[in-house]
Amino acid sequence: MRIGPGRRLRLHWLSFSRTYWLSCVLAFLLGAAFLVFSAGANGSLVKHARPDMQGRMSSLWVVTFLGVYPVGGLLLGIMTDYWSAHVALLVGGIGCAMVAMILLFAPIAREQAEDDARQAGSLSA
């Protein structure tokens, strides 16, 4: 599943929003993007799992969400107490963008390392 720029961009826009109605629209769009992503990612995990492991994959997905989101909410709450909600949302958006970039470039870096290892193996042989 490909991670698009929509979620992190809406989070950045929400951090800069100063009007209530615009914040409500952006929060709605952010929630809709989350629902589409979570349903698609869970479906993709279950679809690609072996039939005897589909239940375990679903339970791992649920445990991951139940374990990670409260920690993120706690961190955002602490940042909001120290600074403001706008700064906390901006930091969250930057974090999402950084993770997306890592996930985007990780397969490319892995393929490059495998190609380099193959070339090094053929040169030494």
Image (tube, grey):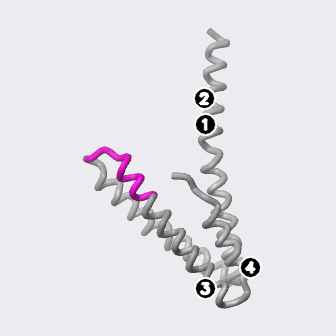
Q: Are marks 4 and 1 in contact (CB under 8 Å)?
A: no
Q: Residues within 10 Å of mark 4 (few under 14, many from 20)?
A: some
Q: How far separated are the C-alphas under marks 4 and 1? A: 36 Å
Q: Amino acid at mark 1?
A: Arg
Q: Residue furthest bottom?
A: 20
Task: Find the magenta span and give its range.
Answer: 41-51
Depth check: give the residue in front, 2 or 53.
2
Image marks 2 and 3: residues in contact by CB distance under 8 Å: no
Among numbered discs 3 and 1, the one appearing first in the sequence: 3
Q: Nearer the viewer, residue 34 or 53?
A: 34
Q: CA distance from mark 2 to mark 3?
A: 46 Å
Q: Which mark is residue 114?
A: 2
Q: Secondary structure at mark 1?
A: helix
Above or below: residue 30 compared with residue 2: below
**Which mark, by number, is residue 21?**
none
Question: Which residue carries the number 1 mark?
Answer: 110
Give percent across and percent down for residue 125.
62, 9
Q: Which residue is denoted by mark 4 in the rendering? A: 16
Q: Nearer the viewer, mark 2 or mark 4?
A: 4
Residue 26 appears left or right of 18? left
